[in-house]
Image (cartoon, helix red, strand yellow):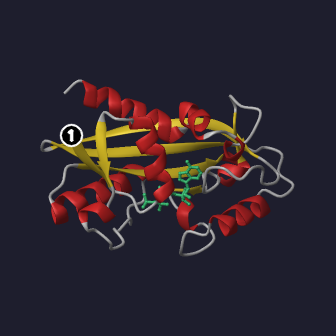
Amino acid sequence: MQDIVFATNNSHKLEEIRRIVGGKFRILSLKEIGCEEDIPETADTLEGNALMKARYVKEHYGYDCFADDTGLMVDALDGAPGVYSARYAGPGHDSAANMALLLKNLDGITTRSARFVTVIALILNGREMTFEGRVEGEILTEAHGTAGFGYDPVFKPVESAVSFAEMTPDAKNAISHRGRATARLMDYLQTL
Ligand code: ITT
């Protein structure tokens, strides 16, 4: 089995990807390769940030790896929080505060269409590639469900009657931004 590092500090993402990839590759975490520091994410695009994270791991630790950057784009907010989704309500990764601010900024707004976009950057055998996945949906007026992470309680995909946080992990992965980007990554890895 081939080892590949997933360059993320988000344990929920790691869990989701491991479930999707199954037994075909062994996905190593940053902790498992001894990388405990915060990896810079200062680009202004999802692709730029995903590449920045993957290049950091390759340069500092020597591993082939992939990294994802994800954003929630809300039409009524001109695409915000977008690439700044993790720190929408300020520094840190406080999902409750981020969701509260999002609901406040959409208060009274009826156009609630939005999409999650994930870009995965892969560095493998001296080559860099990116894979994108997206899911269209809407921002609910209040949080529903407790599964998943991040903005999941307030996002309802168009294909579903319930929010991501009301779905099983497999049901979310089947239609999610990360599930779709990972499927493309896996298609590529199978061709090697
Ligand atoms: P890494 O950079 O270490 O991978 P992160 O949590 O900072 O982890 P992102 O910058 O990609 O990851 O995430 C942007 C924000 O979007 C962050 O607040 C996440 O909680 C949220 N997010 C990412 N994927 C999500 C998903 O599948 N469902 C709901 N929210 C998600």
Q: Amino acid at mark 1?
A: Gln
Q: Residue at x 77, y 32 (%)?
A: 161
Residue at horizontal 41 percent and vertical 43 percent from the top: 18
**Towards the viewer: 46 or 26:** 26
Front-lying residue, 91 or 1: 1
Q: Is ligand 1 within 8 Å of the beta carbon of the residue shown at mark 1?
A: no
The quarter of the image holding the N terminus is top left
Above/below status of 133 relative to 107: above
- Count up the numbered dots: 1
**Percent position of residue 183, x then y:** 41, 31
Say which residue label 1 marks.
2
- Up-down relation of residue 8 to residue 164 (above or below): below
Residue shown at 82% from the left, 51% from the top: 141
Q: Secondary structure at mark 1?
A: strand
Residue under the point 53% across and 37% down: 134
Farthest right residue?
108
Task: Describe residue 70's horizontal placement relative to residue 77 as left or right.
Answer: left
Hey, which quadrant is residue 188 in on the image? top left
Q: Where in the figure is residue 109, as x and y percent of width and height?
A: 82, 51
For residue 158, above or below residue 111: above
- Where is residue 64? Give x, y as percent: 20, 49
Q: Position of residue 93 (x, y in %)?
A: 55, 68
Q: Quadrant of the C terminus?
A: top left
Position of 190 compared to 173: left or right?
Answer: left
